[in-house]
Image: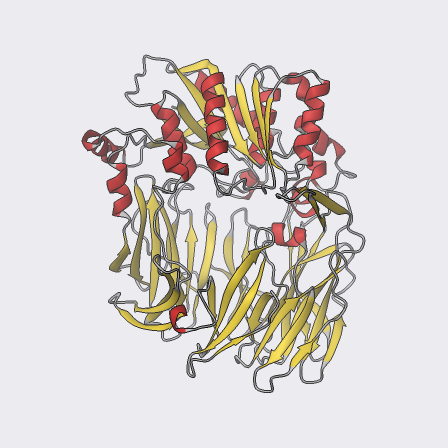
Amino acid sequence: MKGTKLFIGLFFWIALLATGQNKAFTLEEIWGGNFNTEGLQSLHSMNNGTEYSVLERNKVDGSTSIEVYDYASGEKVKTILNSQAISELSGFQEYTFSSNEDLILLLTDSEKIYRHSKRGVYYFYDVGTQKILKLSDEKIQEPTLSPDGKKVAYVLNNNIYVINFETGQEIQLTDDGKKNTIINGITDWVYEEEFAFVRAFDWNADSNKLAFIRFDETAVPEFSMDVYGSALYQKQDVFKYPKAGEKNSTVSLHLADLESMSVDKINLGDYKDFYIPRLSWTQKADILSVQVLNRHQNDLDLVFVDASTKKASVVLNEKDEAYVDITDNLTFLQDNSFIWTSEKDGFNHIYHYDASGQLINQITQGAWDVTSYYGYNAKTKKIYYQSVENGSINRDVYSIALTGKDKIRLSKKEGSNSADFSADYTYYINYFSNSTTPSVITLNKAKNGEIVREIKNNKAVLDKLAQYDVRPKEFSTIDINGEQLNAWVIKPKDFDPTKKYPLLMYQYSGPGSQSVKNSWYSSNDYWYMMLAQQGYIVACVDGRGTGFKGAKFKKATQNDLGNLEVQDQIAAAKYFGGLEYVDAERIGIWGWSYGGFMSSNCLFKGADTFKMAIAVAPVTSWRFYDTIYTERYLTTPQENASGYDNNSPINYVDGLKGKYLLVHGSADDNVHVQNTMRLIEALVQANKQFDWAIYPDKNHGIYGGNTRLHLYTKMTNFIKTNL
């Protein structure tokens, strides 16, 4: 291959294979979770900085408990509560401490709504008295304790309620909430999916004010889908879904004062057709921060609202020719100066601004991206973050002074490292894996990254895999269309470079995504190994538009989704087809969601390159997808019709020559089955033969029971028959 070969731990795998029994992987084992790694569930760093708590489940009786461990020794310190000792609880799924850790909020009977949202029955447990109180007999959303632990706010039936524990009084702050009309304090479908948050309210530091966003969905078009179930008649799920170019919810900011019992609408300024993707109170109890984003998502204002005067002022503005990414990295320091991340110099970096929005300094800089911001230690004035400084397929944890000096690489092993810091930043838990090492969890010193002890090593997974014919990933960079693209390849057992092998390519290619990374395996990777055991080469290439190589590379596909990405995949297939050991007549491609959009286009536009394709839950026209995601990259269909139509698979069905499998879940609230139905109709009218499958009542993930096993069996058989 052209470029630099990065064979990760290949000698390790040679040794492993030499001692293994070369068992073949089976789909039943892969989707039965036989090779899953273990992690830590619901970890919470205790305020004392020396202990942490985790949620543990008894596999025998199903009871759950909150156990506290000492960071340094790993010894159990105490059990805070066990559901066995509480008659009202058979178990709980989540827990949240109050700020002083006197109260614990417990979630039971959880019911998933969409990707991030849920409702459930919640209880409060008083650690001191060991008494428990049910918050409501009804299933509620997003209960959140006030900073002083004396109140809780939650949403029920699209209205916000507050309970005062001292007085026992329940206050209903809003009364206009109504399904598919008005939502208070909870995001609508498109905000939840694309801005990735659900709770749209926040307490101030003094616990006497609550800011919230109100969504008026009245003008948003409705989408409906049948849910078949097992009854004689199906049901219909109807919800507001703004497709590209259609009306969004009208959003407004409101401020509730719990002392004066007033609720005021805040005038943010002269904005039209805008989003409020984030709101949070600053360190000052009367200053609220609000992020206001235009519909094109390339002009963002950070607005401060003075709660006493209700006046709003812009303190920071970010503009970009393409789009501005929304993050949760905004952090206010004690003096109300703040940490902010931005791509304004071409790479994602950390900046420090004063309380008025004036730049103090750029903290990180270089031709690499900061990938996560972990926090700020006020005592040492250190910032902790994750970045790709050590190669775009790797992740490392760093510390750096607020001044931008004294940077230390805390993680030592090459691969994927992430961190969870103790409350006082004395320690952090490091989660490490790479393509030869399953997840290793260690306790490290935040000062220098020194390992204190190992928490979990998942060696049992390696021991189990030693029996199997494991196929390692070989990482490389390849020269495609003038760019050095990251790639991995999995080769068959007893690979012989003088033989010709069929090739299956996997890719996703969505803006800012990454499929080629140095981390431990997913279930798909085991499936690829199974295919490799049966004589296939499997490969993946991250083309233009993917992430962690700077803003220019990521935003190269702006206003033209599916053009450069498809060019890169076709060129990569031709590159592989030019290798002596790849059969250029037997190249296939598959993908899910954006990847299904891509695999369809690759087959339709690259008919002479690809013999077959599988598309799972694909977008087939961006006109069918939601406003926030689609318009971020394409603007609206009214403004950029060619950007929508020139790369939509439904417009290129005449190019189909190879074998094609199309799969969708009928209850996909994200990428609607409408996409597949419209593509099916286009293929039928073009008299193109193809295979397809609809999974009843399955969402975008297409899972539950034997569903994944059935799907991957179908895809495996399709590949073996047609490639």
Residue 636: image x %, image y %?
Answer: 74, 41
Q: Which residue is nearer to you in this view: 87 or 435?
A: 87
Mark yes or no: residue 332 visible. yes
Q: Quadrant of the N terminus?
A: top left
Left or right of 563: which side holds 624? right
Q: Residue furthest bottom?
A: 167
Q: How many marks?
A: 0
Corner quadrant of residue 656: top right
Q: Identify the residue shown where x is 52% and y is 79%.
A: 149
Corner quadrant of residue 182: bottom right
The answer to whether residue 271 is above or below residue 534 is below
Q: Residue furthest right?
A: 219
Mark yes or no: residue 542 visible. no
The answer to whether residue 308 is above or below residue 697 is below
Residue 155: image x %, image y %?
Answer: 64, 67
Corner quadrant of residue 540: top left
The answer to whether residue 315 is above or below residue 621 is below
Q: Which residue is nearer to you in this view: 125 or 195?
A: 125
The answer to whether residue 265 is above or below residue 169 is above
Residue 337: image x %, image y %?
Answer: 54, 70
